[in-house]
Image: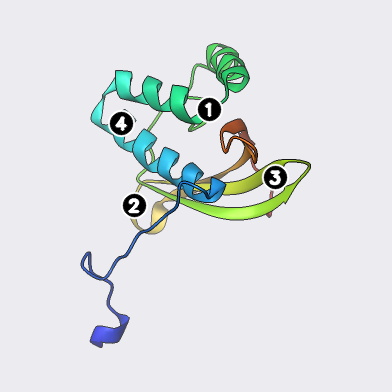
Amino acid sequence: MPDSQTNTAQDTVRSGSPDSAVDRVADFYGAYIDAVSDGTDDLSDELRAHYLTQDFRQRLAAWEEANHADGVLRAQDVPTRWEVRYFDSGAGHLFTTVTLTWGTGPDAGHTQLSVQSDLSTKLISDIEDAPAGS
């Protein structure tokens, strides 16, 4: 494969801005998945407190109690990859689609979540299963 088509860790560039609600969702999911994967429960709670609205944290706790799963990931396991894309905005909110990859190789599964952020605070105010095709 020619060098121009290979993608190594040295070639990968990641950037972001604290002014971007999309970047903040990506920052949250990256750090949150690392914290859960590493087993650092206190950090995942601290990340929730920093990135999620208080109202949503309360609703998330109720969802987790009813579903016996992590409400941020909508699962009991930890994904192997994540991706965040802008979806839409309006009425003071920005919507992103978070794609979580479960496993590796050709048999890896994917789930999509619809994440709502408040534009005024850039805090995440809702997470739901994304509608098909989003």
Residue at disc 4, secondary structure: helix
Which residue is the site of mark 1?
52
User: Quick check: 96 above or below 58?
Assistant: below
Q: Residue at x 25, y 88 (%)?
A: 2
Is disc 2 in contact with disc 4, using a CB cutoff of under 8 Å? no
| Crowding near the residue tagged with mark 1, few <14, some 14–19, many ≥20 C-alpha atoms within 10 Å | many
Q: Amino acid at mark 3?
A: Pro
Q: Amino acid at mark 1?
A: Leu
Residue 1 visible, this angle: no
Which residue is the site of mark 4?
35
Residue at disc 2, secondary structure: loop
Q: Amino acid at mark 2?
A: Thr
**For this view, does 130 lie left or right of residue 80?**
right
| Crowding near the residue tagged with mark 2, few <14, some 14–19, many ≥20 C-alpha atoms within 10 Å | few
The residues tagged by marks 3 and 1 sit, at their Cα atoms, a distance apart of: 22 Å
Q: Is tag 3's residue or tag 1's residue first in the polypeptide sequence? A: 1
Numbered tag placed on residue 104 in the rendering:
2
The residues tagged by marks 2 and 1 sit, at their Cα atoms, a distance apart of: 29 Å
Q: Is tag 2's residue or tag 1's residue first in the polypeptide sequence? A: 1
The residues tagged by marks 2 and 4 sit, at their Cα atoms, a distance apart of: 20 Å
Q: Is tag 3's residue or tag 2's residue first in the polypeptide sequence? A: 2
Residue depth check, mark 2 versus mark 4: number of the one nearer the observer = 4
Which residue is the site of mark 3?
131
Which of the pair 104/117 is nearer the observer?
117
**For this view, does 30 lie left or right of residue 65?**
left
